[in-house]
Image (cartoon, rainbow, N blue to C red):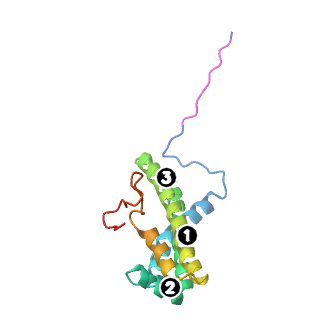
Amino acid sequence: MTGSTQTATVLDPTVPRLDSDPTRALRAATTTVLAVAAPVLFTLSNVALPDLGGSTANVVAHIPAVADRLLAVHLVYALASLLLVLLAVALWRIDTRRGAVLRYVGGALLIVGGISNALGEVVDGYLAWGMHHATVDSAAQVRVLDFLTSPLPPCRSRSSPSRCCRSECSC
């Protein structure tokens, strides 16, 4: 019987490997540029955000003059949130073992947060823009926006349907 010897190739991490993918550099550069664009878009959208005042009634009163600009700002903000997904991918591509778990867990949280923020911004922008263009009554707009921004939605107790769960509510 003749014995066969198997040899394993050991890769030296200090020796650069040849990359057989010709588009890897282009993909890496595109991902990095778009990931850097996210904070720039966040900044631009905050600069372009119209000052609508403090109370919800004041906001509703100011929306007609800036409805299109408000929608555009919310859409740019949503795009910036989605570009954070590319930031997570760019961080995952860093070729080091130190902090790998933190990078992957943080990247996953960044992706979930970016997508959820983008969806919220799109809904918020289209809601304000759509209510204005549909000529919804100002009082109804105030009620909808107050409902969306309130810390606790109104709730009713099962034992006493007329009792509110909020302390400031006078139900």
**Residue 161 visible in the picture:** yes
Question: Which residue, as the protein is rendered here, is positioned at the far bottom?
Answer: 65
Whether 47 is drawn above or below 101: the answer is below
Dot 2 corresponds to which residue? Answer: 63
Mark 3 or mark 1, earlier in chain: 3
What kind of residue is marked 2?
Ile
Dot 3 corresponds to which residue? Answer: 108
Mark 1 or mark 2, earlier in chain: 2
Give the quarter of the image for residue 27. Answer: bottom right
SS under mark 3: helix
Dot 1 corresponds to which residue? Answer: 123
SS under mark 2: helix
Residue 34 relative to residue 4: left or right = left
Query: Where in the figure is residue 29, as x and y percent of width and height?
Result: 57, 64
Whether 10 is drawn above or below 127: the answer is above
What kind of residue is marked 3?
Ala
- For the residues bearing labels 1 and 2, Cβ distance under 8 angstroms: no
Q: Which residues are magenta?
A: 2-10
Q: Main secondary structure of the magenta part?
A: loop
Relative depth, front residue between 161 and 120:
161
Question: Which residue, as the protein is rendered here, is positioned at the far top?
Answer: 1
Mark 2 or mark 3, earlier in chain: 2
Query: Where in the figure is residue 25, as x and y percent of width and height?
Result: 60, 60
Relative depth, front residue between 99 and 61:
61
